[in-house]
Amino acid sequence: MFSRKYKSVREWTHEKRNRFTELACKDPMFPTPGPGKRLDADGVPEVNYAVIGAGITGCSVAHTMLRHEFFQNDTIMVLEASDRTGGAAGISHAQVAPATAIDWGELVRRVGVRSANQAVVFSHRNLARLGELCAGLSAEDRKKVQFRRVKMVTNFANREPKNLYRRWDPAFRRMFTHLGNRFTEKDAGAAGTEYRFRIKSTSGAVEGPGATLNVGELVNALFNEMLREHDGRISVRTNTAVRKIKYRTDNPSLPWLLHTNCGLVRASSVIYCCNGRAAHLNHQLLGKLFPVNHPMSVEGLTPCPPDDSGTYSWRLIQRPTVDYCTGTFKPGQYSVVQDGRSLTYQVSGGPQTVASLFPMSGEDALQLSKNDHRERLHRLFRQPVERLEDWLDLGSSSADEPCDGTYRLSTLGLSSRCVGYTADALPLVGVIPVLNNHTRQNRQWVAAGCNGQGLDKCWLMGEYLVAMIAGEFVDNRLPDCYQITQARLSAMDPQNYLNRLLQVDTYEDRTPINTYLAPN
Ligand SMILES: Cc1cc2nc3c(=O)[nH]c(=O)nc-3n(C[C@H](O)[C@H](O)[C@H](O)COP(=O)(O)OP(=O)(O)OC[C@H]3O[C@@H](n4cnc5c(N)ncnc54)[C@H](O)[C@@H]3O)c2cc1C
């Protein structure tokens, strides 16, 4: 007899496995934009580079190109399906959680020490780069973006992730002497006191460097700056969804014809920064890059909680599961960010039905997440709740406000956005393999697939993709394992994706780590 909760898709029936793979590869409905202005009212516009998607990756690509001398005579058009720039993480405050010992160990196991080290350095460098970018903004924009260096607290939901952390941490510290010292493990008791967690049901935490920021405001400020400083070279079109891209041989210098809801655009080269949806515009990526729903809720606490937004940001990690009976998937990570203005908590991650993982309909995801997110918050924040009487002004409290140290949680908002997962759980950056007759200037490029945690990677992925387009050597800058090769694409199989999603090998591997660390 199987238990109800499944940790491995090995336990799934063939039928279920195939259905899941089928869903993962199915065309999602493209984002439905609002009414946009016609693009081609005065003839089909012609641009050197069409960048699809105005999230943080698309913003980084455009920003870097405009400053790079290789592209000084080129024009860029950014096409964004939704009504605003900023992308998936742009709807609220988001966290930058750079690589920990767990992330490093996972990479060492799968891609080797050299690539894993590159990815850790890349992730921490990305955090520093975001800090520099924000520091360069006007005072007004800095206030809107609210970039804050915080203690990133990764909370272990139970012993499994804690054991995983302990398995890799000593080697991580030896490998990165300076960086390793910036991470501190807290046992359940210490973490409970300091972070006000209900640590009874968790197994401790690790505290490390991190940041929070409003990504939507950052992207907006940077696009405005680009439009001001490079007028005539860049245009940004919102409410413009690309639905189809065709290669036309009749115009070799502008071979790509993009069909959008607002008309046609011709481009020399196409750059996909539209995350999981890229696979549905370029079928070479189908079955390798998947759009996956990612629910988020905004939770308010009554009475008002203390302001921890400038000090901490939280994650809760656990082993992902699938409930065979209900088809519910619970992910490996939840993130919690407090908004410094409203003091509400934004909780993302959360369970969803297997069918609603894919962006056909986010409805089930939202219903399931609503209750789960509240439960998570209860689990994370019992301590402040117990001490709420300290903050509660009993004299001014209304009759229905709690005055016994308990509190009420209310879900103020619930939404679901699309992220990009890959079959090998690593980002995809580089040129999409094409016919030999395509020159560097008219190929198709992609930077996507951060598997739900991209803010420690996306900006530099954009910068180094541009360097690759310019013909620069990026091998010491962009981790090898993120780069696209024909061999990597061929090995990416949607069936592997299932076990990756459930992190089966991550949690079940018992090989001594020295086997992975020993030079071959
Ligand atoms: C609710 C939520 C919260 C998140 N919070 C965090 C967080 O705190 N930390 C973190 O590291 N990661 C977070 N993520 C993960 C997040 O996806 C990435 O970190 C980051 O947003 C990826 O940036 P991107 O620019 O590559 O892609 P996206 O942000 O997904 O941007 C892609 C853009 O392309 C557009 N697009 C898609 N298809 C088309 C088309 N056909 N035509 C035109 N435009 C198109 C989309 O509308 C979108 O604006 C979160 C994701 C979600 C959904």
Image (spheres, rainbow, N blue to C red):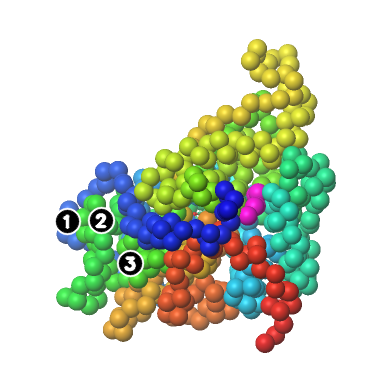
Q: Is residue 221 visible?
A: no
The quadrant holding residue 66 is: bottom left
Q: Going from the N terminus, do you reach mark 2 or mark 3 first?
A: 2
The amino acid type, in three-letter code, at marker 1 is Asp
Q: Is residue 90 left or right of residue 97?
A: left
Pointer 1 residue = 42
Furthest toward the bottom, the residue is 520
Residue in front for this viewpoint, 161 or 439: 161
Give coordinates of residue 159: x percent, y percent: 73, 53
Mark identifier at residue 282 = 3
Range of residues picked out in magenta = 315-319
At x 75%, y 65%, the residue is 167
Establish whether ligand 1 lies closer than 8 Å to the Cβ of label 2. yes
301 lies left or right of 15: right
Instruction: Kindly indicate whether the residue at mark 3 contacts the one at mark 2 (C-beta within 8 angstroms).
Output: no
Tag 3: residue type?
Asn
Relative image position of residue 280 (x, y in whole percent): 33, 61
500 versus 155 height, above or below: below
State the separation of the CA atoms marked 1 and 2. 16 Å
Q: Residue at x 24, y 76 (%)?
A: 253
Q: Quadrant of the C terminus?
A: bottom right
Q: Residue at x 49, y 58 (%)?
A: 12
**Nearer-the-camera pick, 505 or 171:** 505
Vertical position of residue 298 compared to residue 447: above or below: above
Residue 233, numbered circle: none
State the mark number for residue 260.
2
Earlier-in-chain disc, 1 versus 3: 1
Q: Decide whether residue 128 is among the magenta residues.
A: no
Residue 231 pos. (x, y %): 36, 58
The kind of residue on which mark 2 rests is: Thr
